Amino acid sequence: MALMTCPECSHRVSDKALACPSCGYPIAGDGAPRGGVAHVVGRVAGTWLSVSALENIVIAIVFFGGIAAVLITLILVNR
């Protein structure tokens, strides 16, 4: 395992890492394909968005929408 410099933020990163732990910049390690959605979706608001982070965002949005739907239903039924 060798350390390399992240081209985005200049921090030291393992050459086996999928992404820089500091900024999230995608790094092809262990023969991982570069540029696919296998590990990094893309640059959003100045940082790289990983697939696991995107999953968490989608789950939070669905959860919030469900809670909002239940609250709206309770308000309308109790009128």
Image (tube, grey):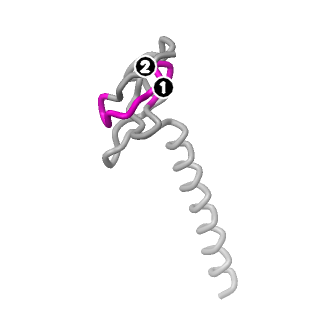
Question: Residue placed at 68% from the left, 80% from the top?
Answer: 77
In the image, residue 78 sits, relative to residue 20, either above or below, namely below
In the image, residue 26 sits, relative to residue 43, either above or below, namely above
Q: Residues within 10 Å of mark 2 (few under 14, many from 20)?
A: some
Q: Find out whether residue 13 is within the magenta segment.
A: yes
Say left or right for 45 vs 78.
left
Q: Which residues are magenta?
A: 7-19
Q: Position of residue 2 (x, y in %)?
A: 46, 17
Q: Quadrant of residue 28?
A: top left
Dominant secondary-structure state across the stretch colored magenta: loop
Report how far apart the C-alphas of labels 1 and 2 lie in the structure: 6 Å
**Tag 2 secondary structure:** loop
User: 21 or 36, which is in the foreground?
Assistant: 21
Is there CB contact under 8 Å for labels 1 and 2?
yes
Q: In the image, what residue type sits under mark 2?
A: Ala
Question: Residue placed at 59% from the left, 50% from the top?
Answer: 59
Q: Position of residue 75 (x, y in %)?
A: 64, 81
Question: Residue placed at 66% from the left, 69% from the top?
Answer: 70
Q: Which mark is residue 18?
A: 1
User: 50 or 16, which is in the foreground?
Assistant: 16
Q: In the image, what residue type sits under mark 1?
A: Leu
Say left or right for 51 vs 74.
left
1 or 2: tag closer to the N-terminus: 1
